[in-house]
Image (cartoon, rainbow, N blue to C red):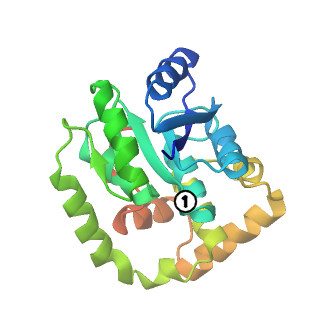
Amino acid sequence: MYRIKILIADDHAIVRDGLRKLLEEQPDMDVIGEAADGVQVVKKVKSLRPDVALIDIAMPRLSGLEATGLIKESLPNIQIVMLSMHEKDAYVDRALAAGALGYVLKASPTSDVLEAIRAVYRGKYFLSSKVNAQIIDTYLKNRKEKSDVSNYNLLSEREQQVFRLLVEGRETSELSDILCISLKTVKKHRANIMKKLDIHNMVDMMKYAVKIGIVGPELWEEE
C-alpha cells in the first residue's frame, strides 16, 4: 500500500506531536517532516516534496495562507489542508483562494483531519462538518466569475506573489526575506504592479484586492 507523504506545519510543538502520533497510526500515512513557521514550511515543502501539507492558518513569519499561496505557485501538485480556529466564511474562502483543498477546524474530531488528508490527496475538496459545505460551491462560482479580471492577470507570477503579500500587510522589507530577492527588486515589482493596475497607494491596492477577491473585507474589519 502506498503511504501518503505528509508534512505538518504548526508553531506549537504539542500540536505537531499530537498530529504526528495520530497520522503515524494510519496504515496509509507517513509523516516525512515538520515546520514551526510559515517560511520554514515553504522551504521544507520544496525540499521534501510531500503529497499533502497540513498547515496551521496562523503561524509566525509567514501565515498559513501566505505560505499556501507560495507553495501552490511553485509546486501546484502538492495538496494543502488548512488547520484553523476560524469558522467564518471569509477565512474559508481565503484558504480556498490560496490553493488549499481542505479546511479543518481545530475543534473538529480527529477523523476530520484523516478524511481531509485522504480527500485532498485524491484532488477532492474537504471542509470540516461545522463549516457550511455551500462555501465550496460559492467559491468555485465566484472564481469563475472573477477569472476575467484582466488587469490582475497581466501581472507576472512573481508580481502576483508580491501583490498578495503586500495586501496581507507585509512590509516591503519583509518581502525581500520571504521571497529571497533583493529589496531593490521588491520595490521594482511593487512599482510595476501599481503601474499595471493603475493604482497609486496601498489603500487603493487593498481596495482592489477586496474587489477581485484576493482578501475578504471581513478580515480587514477585524484587523
Residue 21: tell me if it is visible.
yes
Residue 216: tell me if it is visible.
no
Q: Picture coordinates of residue 210 (x, y %)? A: 37, 61
Q: Which residue is mark 1?
A: 72
Q: Picture coordinates of residue 51 (x, y %)? A: 54, 50
Drawn side of residue 132 relative to residue 222, left or right = left
Residue situated in front as seen by the camera: 26 or 189:
26
Residue situated in front as seen by the camera: 93 or 212:
93
* Residue at image location 37% in from the left, 79% down from the top: 147
Placement of 125 over or under 190, stated as above or below: above
* Residue at image location 74% in from the left, 62% down from the top: 186
Q: Hey, what amino acid is under mark 1?
A: Lys
Q: Element under label 1? A: helix
Q: Picture coordinates of residue 145 (x, y %)? A: 27, 77
Drawn side of residue 166 relative to residue 144, left or right = right
Residue 140 falls in which quadrant of the image?
Answer: bottom left
* Residue at image location 17% in from the left, 45% down from the top: 132
Q: Picture coordinates of residue 164 (x, y %)? A: 54, 59
Residue situated in front as seen by the camera: 61 or 201:
61
* Residue at image location 67% in from the left, 67% down from the top: 190
Q: Residues within 10 Å of mark 1 (few under 14, many from 20)?
A: some
Residue situated in front as seen by the camera: 196 or 41:
41
